[in-house]
Image (cartoon, rainbow, N blue to C red):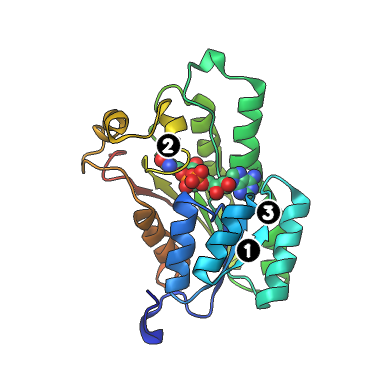
Amino acid sequence: MTLPNSSRRLDGKVAIVTGAGSGFGYGIAKKFTEEGAKVIVAELSKESGEKAASELDAKFVLTDVTSRESWQSLLQATLDTYRQLDIVVNNAGTTYHNKPTGDVTDADFDMCMNVNVKSIYLSANVIVPYFEQNNRPGNFIQISSTAALRPRPGLTWYNASKAAVGIANKSMAVEYGPKNIRFNCVCPVVGSTGLTHLFLGKPDTEENRAGFVSTVPMGRPSTPSDIANACCYLASDEANFITGVNLEVDGGRCV
Ligand SMILES: NC(=O)c1ccc[n+]([C@@H]2O[C@H](COP(=O)([O-])OP(=O)(O)OC[C@H]3O[C@@H](n4cnc5c(N)ncnc54)[C@H](O)[C@@H]3O)[C@@H](O)[C@H]2O)c1
């Protein structure tokens, strides 16, 4: 549903949403388009990225967030299409299957660090200069996790990758605050997406999720709309004095 122009909170803004082909990223891209933003679906999966873009009237750009060249092409494609960029949502992320930490492989570790952490480094390295050179306010939103703040067992290096995102985010918030470039994290509690069976270490069923959900005071998992609504606030001008926060969207899990 597209809202009437007068009440749209992201009118006139252009946003990149990584990993927008599914899960939370799709929800964020949908909310942003409903609120008037032009959205770039930056996704590794051609099939889901094209489908999402066509459903949301957005633009798909095939993107691997672990590659510098890919970030450079993504920025260029954004500017070629929409002539400006305002918001980057670093949502793409991954994990290995929940398992004892002693069983984690080098490949598991590298995958978490590359997709979850190197992507944040590259996004800032490639896109901050665009904001600086054009003297524009900038807005980065990192989809971190409650795992960064209240970790669960069997996911040590996923948890550590999200904790790294949190401190890098705070560090950039203080460094770039004087240039009006904001950096915030949204920290979801477990949801039901393509990654959930990996977090659980078993199929994503209500029964298997019950153990995780039992530690959430409000008694349910997060939804893509919960995460999208938090991102919309941080992306909007309503949040223009908010930087460096971890916004927990977790029904009280981290209290
Ligand atoms: N699902 C949860 O319970 C949960 C909880 C807390 C945080 N998160 C975080 O939410 C974010 C979104 O994950 P999700 O749960 O929606 O999972 P998902 O698997 O549904 O979505 C992730 C998307 O990222 C894309 N992607 C993966 N690697 C990529 C790459 N190298 N370049 C570009 N795109 C890539 C995938 O193709 C997929 O479309 C992740 O950062 C995840 O860590 C998820």
| Residue lying at 38% horizontally and 34% vertically, measured from the top left | 204
Q: Position of residue 36 (x, y in %)?
A: 47, 77
Q: State the CA–CA distance, disc 2 to disc 1.
A: 25 Å
Q: Is residue 177 visible?
A: no
Amino acid beneath label 1:
Phe
**Which of the numbered marks, if any, corresponds to residue 91?**
none
Q: State the CA–CA distance, disc 1 to disc 3.
A: 9 Å
Quarter residue 236 falls in: bottom left
| Residue lying at 63% horizontally and 63% vertically, measured from the top left | 60
**Which of the numbered marks, if any, corresponds to residue 196?**
2
Say above or below: 93 vs 12: above
Q: Which residue is mark 1?
A: 60
Say above or below: 230 vs 39: above
Circle 1 crowding by C-alpha within 10 Å: few under 14, some 14–19, many from 20: many
Say above or below: 66 vs 157: below
Left or right: where 149 falls relative to 131: left
Q: Position of residue 148 (x, y in %)?
A: 45, 37
Q: Which residue is mark 3?
A: 63
